[in-house]
Amino acid sequence: MSRETADAIVLKTTEFSESSLILDVFTREFGKISGLAKGARRLKNPFETSLDLLASIRLSFIKKDSDALDLFTEAKLRRRFRPTARNYRGLYAGYYIAELLDRTILEDQTYPELWSLADATLERLQFRSSVEARVAYFEAGLLEALGEFPSIRGCVDCGEELPLERVDNLERGVYFDVVAGGVVCSRCRARARRWALVRTTIGALKALDVSRRGAKETLRIARTLDNWRSALESETTGLSTLERLDRENRVRSAFIELDEETLEPYNAFPRASRLAFRKLAEQYVCRTLRLRPRTLDFLPLAFGEREQRGEVPETELASNGADG
Ligand SMILES: [Zn+2]
């Protein structure tokens, strides 16, 4: 038994008793942990209503040596996940990210880069557009962190190179083995029967490749922002509130500009390539999780696709988002 503190993202909360909750959280320092938050459902409690889904918190807990649940003793809110009332897209995308993390990361294993990517992605989902690009970057970063990123530059069987950069026709078809985890050349395709073979396009593979780089860029910008924030803290001591606010606003605008640039490579793909990528990403995510995530059905709403096709009026979606 030991006392610990950690930065954590709340992935799942389950009512345990009249007054307590069981929580699954993803921590930067210890990976995934499940614990009992005694008294969390009481009005006055040591968690200060910080235990909402996807909240980013500073958690104190007692780590049990046995299989028993850890005991969460206190939590302070770092950032609530609360997309604005009309930003239902960010909300649905957040639920999807929570389910992916909850189902894939293992206990007793740490994923510091993935934690930072999740934290940065959730922060940005609250206040910016381009939800589709952010989800794509997160999925690519998750696959990378799990060691499941597929082979897209060479045949998964024989290794024959697929020169992705030199193929310009985004519509060109490619075969992809979802179970083996990568593209398959024509020779290997003819040689054996494959039951998990799907047809995708060069455009989809390029979007996946760009998403992997997008995940790295997101991390780089998140680190830059952290450095700016700490520099700002030391620089602005002694300044007036107005001067301080002005500096903060300038940092924020510079950050938003940098961050928007990282989304451009994905957003530049034609719609056909993005749709082919989504189809492949969904098949591959289901294969990695060995089941279909429930929240996958939220993604068309998160990306505004049904709305674009005129199936759901905007007002209905907006009220869903507002209700949480
Ligand atoms: Zn081959």
Image (cartoon, helix red, strand yellow):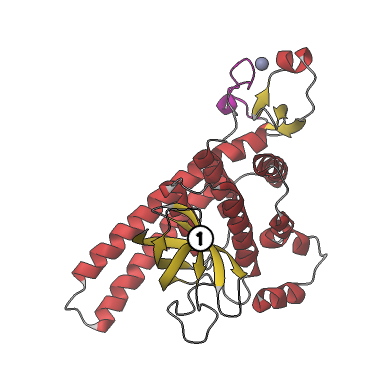
Q: Residues within 10 Å of mark 1 (few under 14, many from 20)?
A: some
Residue 158 belongs to the span the image colors magenta: yes
x then y, percent, for residue 89: 64, 65
Above or below residue 11? Residue 66 is above
Q: Is residue 220 left or right of residue 96?
A: left
Tell me which corner region of the image, top left, top right, bottom left or bottom right, holds residue 234.
bottom left
Quarter holding the N terminus is bottom left
x then y, percent, for residue 43: 51, 87
What span is in magenta?
Answer: 154-168
The one of 302 and 99 positioned closer to us in this rendering: 99
Tell me which corner region of the image, top left, top right, bottom left or bottom right, holds residue 192.
top right
Which residue is depicted at the point 40% across and 65% down? 61
Report the amino acid beneath label 1: Leu
Give the image quadrant in which the ligand numbered 1 is located. Answer: top right
Residue 197 belongs to the span the image colors magenta: no
Which residue is depicted at the point 54% across and 65% down? 23
Which residue is depicted at the point 70% across and 47% down? 271
x then y, percent, for residue 150: 60, 32
Return the residue at label 1. Answer: 69
Quarter holding the C terminus is bottom right
Which residue is depicted at the point 80% across and 68% down? 312
Residue 125 in view (yes/no): no
